Image (cartoon, rainbow, N blue to C red):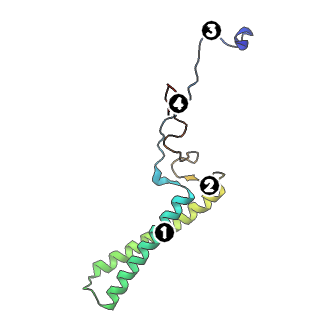
Amino acid sequence: MICRRLGLFSQSVRAIDGSKFKAVNNRDRNFTLAKMKRRAEVIDKSIERYLRQLDAMDQGSAVVTEAQTTRLKEKITSLTEEVQQLQSIEIQRTETPDQQVSLTDPDARSMNANCGLQRADGYR
């Protein structure tokens, strides 16, 4: 009201809305400490499993084709590359104030689904 009396506003009315909209920040491209730890554990277990399978093939306990051996080696190589990517992302993550990295948008952050959202009648 004071600003209107001082002539700082025109006669038009503007409203500011605090609505939150779901952004397109793919969860697979957003990294937090907990998510990176979980993914590293999954990768380690997978690599161990593939190495055990290769060892079993070397022992001759299973009938092995060249394609099976090649496929397991490709999987291990792929997982090793993913570990290297996670290590570079970890460096970025530790340098951010909130310990998150988004590859989609550097400013995007992971939020709880109902964080800050409120119905018009005041209930959550």
Q: Amino acid at mark 1?
A: Glu
For disc 3, the neighbor class at 10 Å (few under 14, some 14 to 19, many from 20) is few
Question: Sequence order check: which comes first, mark 1 or mark 2?
Answer: 1
Residue pointed to by mark 1: 41
For disc 1, the neighbor class at 10 Å (few under 14, some 14 to 19, many from 20) is few
Q: Amino acid at mark 3?
A: Gln
Question: Left or right: 17 with respect to 28?
Answer: right
Please tell me in which quadrant of the rendered image residue 47 appears: bottom left
Q: Is residue 28 above or below residue 25?
A: below
Q: Label 3, secondary structure: give it.
A: loop
Q: Label 4, secondary structure: give it.
A: loop
Q: Position of residue 44 (x, y in %)?
A: 47, 72
Question: Sequence order check: which comes first, mark 3 or mark 2?
Answer: 3
Give the residue at x 53% y 45%: 111
For disc 4, the neighbor class at 10 Å (few under 14, some 14 to 19, many from 20) is few
User: Given contact means CB atoms under 8 Å apart, are the residues at marks 3 and 4 in contact?
Assistant: no
Residue pointed to by mark 4: 19
Residue pointed to by mark 3: 11
Question: Left or right: 30 with respect to 7?
Answer: left
Indicate which label's residue lies in the foreground, 3 or 2. Answer: 2
Per the rendering, the mark at residue 99 is 2
Q: Is residue 80 above or below residue 10?
A: below
Q: Amino acid at mark 2?
A: Gln
For disc 2, the neighbor class at 10 Å (few under 14, some 14 to 19, many from 20) is some
Marks 1 and 4, how far apart at CA: 38 Å
Q: Label 1, secondary structure: give it.
A: helix
